[in-house]
Image: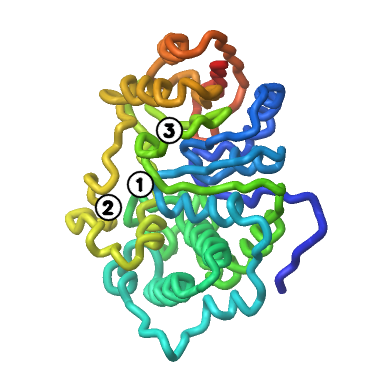
Amino acid sequence: MIKKETVEHIFPTTRYQGSKHKLSDWIWDNIKELKFDTCLDAFGGTGAMSYKFKQNNKITTYNDLLKCNYLIGVSTIENNTQILTQEDIETVFSKNKNIKYPSFIADNFKNIYFLDKENSEIDVMITNILNMKNKYKAAIAFNCLSQSCLIKRPYNLFHRANLYMRTSNVKKTFGNKTSWNQQFEYWFNKFVNEINNSIFDNNKKNSCLNSSIFDLDKTNYDLVYIDTPYVSSKGSNTNYLDFYHFLEGLARYNNWETLINQKTKNKSFKREIYPNIWTKDTIHKSFDDLFNKFQNSILVVSYRSDGIPTIKELTDMIKKYKRTITIVRNEYQYALSKRHIKEVLIIGA
């Protein structure tokens, strides 16, 4: 049963690595006194900060290079009024006699991420979602399917072909076998309720973009929020496409076959599809180019105290373009980190 409760609108739960949802209140408390009406969430991800901006009546632009993330943004940021009904859900799970259903996932991902029956179900669901006429309903449905896929995965990731973790009879010391084996329809309905209850209208024209940040038009946003892929002090970088390529494949379902690197066991994307400019060798120039591009906006950078570049290097870069620099630190413990790492906010105004 779908509910649209008259309660405070709450950002839906997410299993996405690097989400700023738990830090969004702290970030907002440190920037709310800045004077801005329009803002760009340059690397939107789950949309947690875009949602916070929207809640505080800012004209919000969400951007992300990955189409799967963009669609999540469309569902909660650009969308002001549309929700999924019970009829919509039935449409997602029912075969339409007028549609010829592909079997791409069933044919290509056997014994990799999901059971055979589940692969066939996903083929049906994503085909029905792609045939939905309402852009925002389709985006919500895609968001619910993405979250359902994540919660049924060990580690909530697609970085390894590790279905055996679900199917083996050995005692698990992590994860939740009950969650992994729960039906897609159960999880989908749960996430529909969450996302439906998150939808609201802030009476602003918010928008979502699906682009490399350097390909965006040079619009003068009052504030640009920056949370780039992270490079640790040891030089290892976070490549979200490696983690979530299956979701990106769903978003690009009709072209998925051309995007897969067939040499990989887990059918990940070809590296050249999205060249990564946030690596140890390129990240300094990428940051400087980014600050230069948006030098007429207030710059707000979310960062970790152990990253490359260092806090000082980043601050020195921003000083080339901004007069006032503020650095705020938060004693935040990352779930997967054993080290005591501070979350840092660098504000150039």
CB under 8 Å between callouts 2 and 1? yes
Above or below, comparing residue 20 to residue 176 in the picture: above
> Which badge, 2 or 1, comes first in the chain's sequence?
1
Above or below, comparing residue 53 to residue 192 in the picture: above
Farthest right residue? 6
Are there few (<14), some (14-19), or many (20+) residues within 10 Å of tag 2? many
> Which badge, 1 or 3, comes first in the chain's sequence?
3
Residue type marked 2: Phe
Instruction: Identify the secondary structure beneath mark 3.
Output: loop
Q: Which residue is denoted by mark 1 in the rendering?
A: 241
Q: Which residue is denoted by mark 3 in the rendering?
A: 218
Q: Which residue is denoted by mark 2 in the rendering?
A: 269
Q: Picture coordinates of residue 34 (x, y %)? A: 67, 22
**Residue shown at 39% from the left, 73% from the top:** 123
Instruction: Identify the secondary structure beneath mark 2.
Output: loop
**Residue shown at 53% from the left, 65% from the top:** 135
Question: From this viewpoint, is residue 178 visible?
Answer: no
Instruction: Identify the secondary structure beneath mark 1.
Output: helix
Measure the alpha-carbon separation of dots 2 and 3.
30 Å
**Quarter of the N terminus within the rendering:** bottom right
CB under 8 Å between callouts 1 and 3? no
**Residue shown at 32% from the left, 77% from the top:** 103
